[in-house]
Image (tube, grey):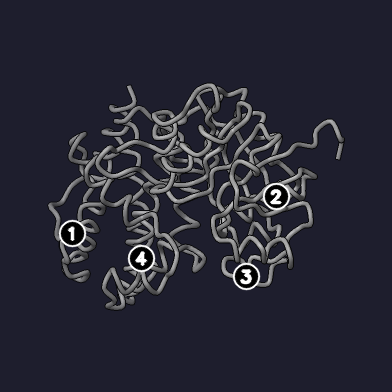
Amino acid sequence: MNMDLKKKVTVAGAGSWGTALAMVLADNGHDVKLWGNNAVQIEEINQTHKNKKYLPGVELPVNIVGFTDLAEALEGVDTVILAVPTKAIREVVQKINKDANQPVTVVHVSKGIEPDSLLRISEIIEQERNEEKISDIVVLSGPSHAEEVVLRHPTTVTVSSKNMEAAAKVQDLFINQNFRVYTNPDLIGVEIGGALKNIIALAAGIIDGLGYGDNAKAALMTRGLAEIARLGTVMGANPLTFSGLTGIGDLIVTCTSVHSRNWRAGNMLGKGYTLEQALDAMGMVVEGVRTTKAGYQLAEKYNVKMPITVALYKVLFEHKDVQAAVDSLMSRDKKSEMEDLVDILHSAK
């Protein structure tokens, strides 16, 4: 690549998605510092160029170097990819405030909403950031499984920010022949779509676990997208965003793939596992669980009808039987499908 375009970039979070994005950046010729707090894992990355726990069988490029010291990982970089679970966002942003030695653009790639505060991830970062250390906040989202990105299969994502010049720079940082990056100025819509589709993916896994077929899943995904769009537009999103990559695109890939943590957890619930058993078996963060709580709270706050979210909340947090939850959805009062479209369009005015 053109040496003038070569950058030093830190990826904070050495899980599957952080490592996959580190590979995209490395493929583009950038020097990538991959930070994690597990010393054994980081040593494995540096010594063997493998991250076996999260991406078994994948050879990492030599221009990815692991760090356990965030201050050291931040030296000389102006862009930080924040690839940690939603519940860890505040802590890591506070570390960046403390350890960054020059202003950085933070690119968050997690998909969630904080329960109780009901903040989107960019809002959490905004609330915590020291503006002298974090200059801009960008979100990268879209239909993208780490397991396919590392195989360099064609993938498309979206970047958004309050500062679209910063988003365009992130687009340039990542884009290549395998990883296509679009821009979208609708920050609210991009984050809401990316977060709430995890709720529907959990429900899709339950549908499959119960042994239902394509009819049921198609109905769930379609009605789920309506819920996402209803809430998103009330919160200020552009309804067209939910027809794009971070809406229907992300919904399709997360509801239909065995790579999806949320689908896999839901599938176990449908087969009779308890939530605790499913999460223990996963061994990784399932963002949809926390997001279901936040989605339920948002539905109440904005007085938006979200029957799938409510049913899933009752399964996860009130121990309602999954079969009874499905039955309750199918026995709701009859209505016209067009009512949803009218509601969404009215909210967007």
- Number of the front mark, 1 or 3: 3
Distance between the alpha carbons at the discs numbered 4 and 3:
37 Å
| Tags 1 and 3 touching, CB below 8 Å | no
Closest to the observer, 280 or 274? 280
Distance between the alpha carbons at the discs numbered 1 and 2:
39 Å
Q: Amino acid at mark 4?
A: Asn
Quadrant including the C terminus: top left
Query: Residue drawn 63% across and 71% down?
Result: 56
* Up/down of 180 relative to 348, above or below: below
- Number of the front mark, 1 or 4: 1
Residue 51 appears at what percent x and percent y? 64, 65
Distance between the alpha carbons at the discs numbered 4 and 2:
37 Å
Residue 304 appears at what percent x and percent y? 21, 38
Q: Which mark is residue 314?
A: 1
Near mark 1 (Cα within 10 A), the count class, few <14, some 14-19 or many ≥20, is some
Q: Amino acid at mark 3?
A: Lys
Residue underneath mark 3 = 52
| Res. 103 image quadrant | top right
- Number of the front mark, 4 or 3: 3
Q: Which mark is residue 24?
A: 2
Q: Amino acid at mark 2?
A: Val
